[in-house]
Structure formats: C-alpha cells, structure tokens
Image (cartoon, rainbow, N blue to C red):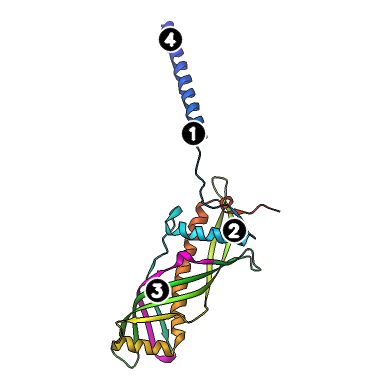
Amino acid sequence: MDLNLNRFAICLIIICAKLSESQRISFRRYDIVPTNPPLPFPACRADDIECLRRGFRTFFFLMNEGHMGMHRIDPLILNSVSVAVPNEQVSFVLRKVNVTGATWSKLSDRKFNNQNGKNSVRLISDLHVTGVITMRLSRNIEPAVAFITMDFDNVESNITYSWYGQRGYDNEDYIVIGQERIAVRNSKTPLFFLQPGGSRDSFAIEQVMLSKTAILDHLANEITVALMHAVVDNFRIFAATVPVKNYYIYNYK
C-alpha cells in the first residue's frame, strides 16, 4: 500500500514538473512574438503642429476604415436637414443627404488648455453634398421639390471640448472627451445647381436661394455641424481605446 502511494506521489510530481516546464516554454514563446504598433504614425508633441497635421490626416483615413471601432464618415448619410426663415415665410427641408470629402479635412490649428481649460481643433474642409430639397412658401399650397448638388469650399469648423485624463484598468492613461461645441464659418457662399433643370420647381427654388444666400449658408452650417459631431464621436471612441502615449508625447520639458 505504501509502495503504491509513493509511486503515485512520484508520478504526480513528474507530471506537475512537465506542465510547469511546458507553461514556461509557452510564455517564453509568447513574449518574443513581435507585436504591431497600434497606430501607423508616431506620437506628437502638443506644440508640433506639422506632426499633428500628419497625424490628423492619418486619423481621418483610419476613421473611415472603421479602425478601433470608429464609424465611417465619408460618405456621411443624413436623414434630413431643415432651415426656416420666418421673416420670409419660407422653409427648406433637405432629405437623403449624402456628404463626401470629409476624409480630406485639414488641421488648421490645435490648442490645448485654453483659458476655460478646454481644448480646441480647427479644421478646414471641402465638401460635396447631394440631396432632395423641398421648399415650402406660405402663399403656395404645393411645395417645390428638386434634386440639389452643393459644394462647400474652405469651410472652417472650430471644435471646442472639455476633457480630462483617466487611468485605465491596464494602468495606462486615456483621455475622456466631454461635450463639444462646434462653430462653422463659410469663407464663400456655397455653389449649387438643381435638377431637373428648367422645371417649375427648380426655377422657384433657385430664385429664392439666389435672392437669399443666407439660406445656403444655413444649410451648409447645419450639414457641417452634423458631420463634425460624427467626427467628435469617433474622437471619443479612439481616445477611450488607445492610450495617450501612442499619439501624444505629454511628458516633456
């Protein structure tokens, strides 16, 4: 009986030793496997605007590819955008809005810790927009409907947002982005044309838009703001997923 117990104990020790050895080998093999960097661009100092511009360009491409769970923004599809001008008793609704060109947005300026403690980003975009536009005038029962194509050149978006740093469960630093505020400025009146050309509805819409160019500016602002909100939402996903050290050099003298 004692002999059998001794044999069992010896066998158990040998098996445990083999398992321990195999685990060490497995971990050693795992440790030496090279890993890909999480981002295809180097980390930037906060005051290196050229590095930040290259990073933003790459970020927009990554965003459009759904990298790190982000959502595609080029093209961006909006259900509807509406603008009302009470003084003129006219309203416009743009439906089935398709916005392209966001991928090529350029970083104009980047500021950290402004006087109110917030960060800001200024982007310049050239956007191409299509959709179905409906105009309603108080004096007309039937609305005018046409297909519209618009170009927004050098649209400036100033995004201001609150933020704070947070240590994750992996002991890495992450940025938490708070509520954003977006201000849009058009450097020029958006260009547009309507289809079908020569129709009564297209002519009526064109006459109002040419006489009240502020309507075009309002449409451009609403569309651009919606686009930039989508961009900031992707910023949040990115910042919550990627440690700060991978895209900012924030401990420097």
Chain-order first, disc 1 or disc 2 = 1
Magenta span of residues: 87-106
Residue 103 within the magenta-colored segment of the rendering? yes
- The count of marks equals 4
Residue 35 versus residue 198 in the image, above or below: above
Please provide percent x and percent y for residue 60: 48, 60
Q: Which mark is residue 7?
A: 4
Instruction: Classify the position of the N terminus by image quarter.
Output: top left
Circle 2 Cα neighbour tier, 10 Å, few/some/many (<14 / 14–19 / ≥20): some
Work out how far the residue at label 2 is from the one at label 4, CA to CA, in angstroms: 68 Å
Q: Which mark is residue 107?
A: none
For the residue labelled by badge 2, is the local secondary structure a helix, a strand or a loop? helix
Q: Amino acid at mark 4?
A: Arg
Work out how far the residue at label 1 is from the one at label 2, CA to CA, in angstroms: 34 Å
For the residue labelled by badge 4, is the local secondary structure a helix, a strand or a loop? helix
Residue 209 versus residue 185 in the image, above or below: below
Chain-order first, disc 2 or disc 3 = 2
Write down the residue under mark 2: 51
Q: Which mark is residue 129?
A: 3
Chain-order first, disc 3 or disc 4 = 4
Question: Which residue occupies 54% across, 53% down?
Answer: 41
**Horizontal placement of 44 versus 31: left or right?**
right
Residue 195 within the magenta-colored segment of the rendering? no
> Foreground mark, 4 or 1?
1
- Asked if residue 230 shows in the view, the reply is no
Residue 145 versus residue 126 in the image, above or below: below
Work out how far the residue at label 3 is from the one at label 4, CA to CA, in angstroms: 81 Å
Work out how far the residue at label 1 is from the one at label 3, CA to CA, in angstroms: 50 Å
